[in-house]
Amino acid sequence: MMKTLIYKAEKEAFQRAGEVLKHGGIVAFPTDTVYGLGAVYTDDEAVRSIFRAKGRDEGKPLSILVEGPWQAEMVAAEVTDEAKALMERFWPGALTLILPKNNTVSDYVSAGGSTVGIRMPADETALGVIRAAGSPLAAPSANTSGKRSSVSAEDVRTDLEGKIDMIIDGGTCPIGISSTVLDLTGADIRILREGTVTREMIEETIGRRINDKQEAVMIAAGSDHAGFEMKNALIEHLKERGYEVKDFGCFSAESCDYPEYAKAVSEAVVSGEAQMGMLICGTGIGMSIAANKVKGIRAAVVSDEFSTQATREHNDANVICMGARVIDIPKAIKLLDIFLDTEFSNGVNHIRRIGKIEQ
């Protein structure tokens, strides 16, 4: 286990942080939202170290923090006039812009995609670290994937000590919530996550309406005490993907009876209140049994990629059930994405068999 250095946010800390980052290390530091983990964005091994420290799936992209709009042009293939207007008004601040990446951004940062999220934080400590590194930083939140975001150096130390090189203690973050995320890469601007920068503020800045309110997909979520932590991590992931989520409980890690949550989620799906359901318990089995008591529900327990895809293509499953004691959170995120991204095949044989199930 590595030794994690902890410095107060003073001149010596920035000098040391610059040395650590330039030599492939990871530094945690406060921003205007939550504490972040930084690594030089062009250093593939350092970026991969972030994934290992967080226990994060490498299939999820990382955002990049910059010192100013001029650094955004170092990583983006194109910065449009609308992007420049948004930077001018909201940077530094809690607005992440998704832009097409250029060839300096590796696939480890973008998870193999063609875009990258860029933000300039409104925090002098964060800007000082970026300046000391002499480079934009790949910088997700400083917490183990699935856990609450860190808003103090003590939060980071408790969670990640021994996994990262350095923590800069800059006090408690003033906002404590994540930034607004705005996708500027398509013909239509899309708000992927709304934070302190609102839709109205964005529309006022660019001088036009954002027509991204396509048919909203609602996911009904539920868990028992064993699945509570995993459910919360999956809800956060769903919101990052732009889904609406209604959480039917439970709302703590105290022991509870899972059938009532399975029933609530299932009834939301069959009534049309939600399009899909997600249930988490220790194994996923109890939840699936309880859910399938509700007519119209096709709940499937999954723990691997093949079965997850097959149950959507062949069974048109509408509730995914997973076991928090069977798979970890990164695996659950991957399976949930497969479940939501896979369409029913509409094969004649499959339609006939589903009809027989529901007789």
Image: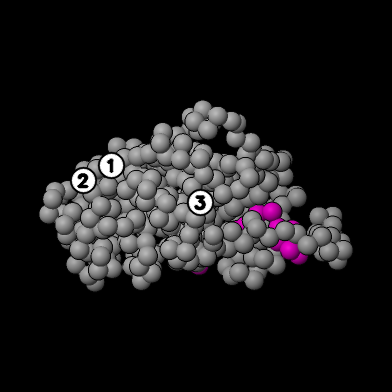
Callout 2–callout 3 Cβ contact below 8 Å: no
- Count of numbered marks: 3
Residue at image location 20% in from the left, 63% down from the top: 19
Residue at image location 30% in from the left, 45% down from the top: 31
> Does the rendering let one see residue 187?
yes
Task: Look at the image and say whether residue 22 sits in the magenta stretch.
Answer: no
Callout 2–callout 1 Cβ contact below 8 Å: yes
Give the number of the mark in front: 2 or 1.
1
Residue 123 is labelled as 1
Residue with the mark numbered 3 = 78
Answer above or below: position of 330 versus 203: below
Callout 3–callout 1 Cβ contact below 8 Å: no
What residue range appears in magenta?
Answer: 312-326
Q: x, y percentage for residue 303? A: 57, 68
Residue 72 left/right relative to 344: left
Q: x, y percentage for residue 324? A: 49, 61
